Image: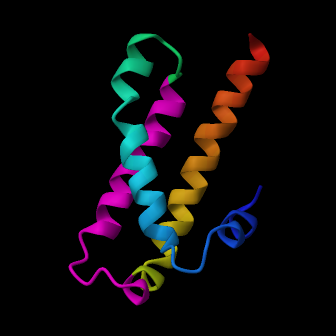
Amino acid sequence: MNYDQQKAMLPNFVVVQDEVIADFDDSFLLLPELIEKRYLNNSCIANIIRCHNLIGLVTRNPDKDAKSYEKNENLWKKIRFFAKDALDELIKEEEAS
């Protein structure tokens, strides 16, 4: 499902970027365990960390309203790019197994 389809599924009161950040932060806490179990290759790990760093840049903006997130659209595009690459790596790993 692409970004627009996912966004359309959420209720109107949901701030999409806040949901993405909260879900990613929760998932990022599991990264050390996934690395220790060797579930991820280095490329996937690097892309996940890149996403984490870029999300950090977006959230450092003290003006956290929806308009400030829109101003960071280029950062969000990069985040989606690296996230897609990480997922593609996971799919390749799964298919190779």
Tell me: residue 89, above or below residue 57: above
Pinpoint residue 2: horizontal percent, then vertical percent.
Answer: 75, 60
- Here the colouring is rainbow
Determine the image quadrant of residue 30: top left
Q: Position of residue 47 (x, y in %)?
A: 49, 41
Location of residue 32 with respect to 3 vertically, above or below = above
**Looking at the image, is 71 positioned above or below residue 53?**
below
Q: Considering depth in this image, is 46 or 61 the residue closer to the camera? A: 61
Q: Which residues are magenta?
A: 42-68
Rendered location of residue 42, percent (x, y): 48, 25
Q: Does the magenta-highlighted stretch encompass residue 61?
A: yes
Q: Residue at x 68, y 64 (%)?
A: 3
Q: Nearer the viewer, residue 77 or 67?
A: 67
Residue occupying the point 42% across, 84% down: 66
Q: Quadrant of residue 91?
A: top right
Number of disc labels: 0
Question: Left or right of 20: which side holds 8?
Answer: right
Frontmost residue, 59 versus 86: 59
Give the residue displayed 38% in from the left and 39% down from the top: 28
- Above or below, 60 against 92 in this view is below
Q: Nearer the viewer, residue 39 or 81?
A: 39
Asked if residue 47 is among those painted magenta in the image, a careful observer would answer yes
Find residue 95 and report its horizontal and vertical position in percent.
79, 19
Which quarter of the rendered picture does the N terminus lie within?
bottom right
Magenta stretch: dominant SS? helix
Q: Quadrant of the C terminus?
A: top right
> Farthest left residue?
62
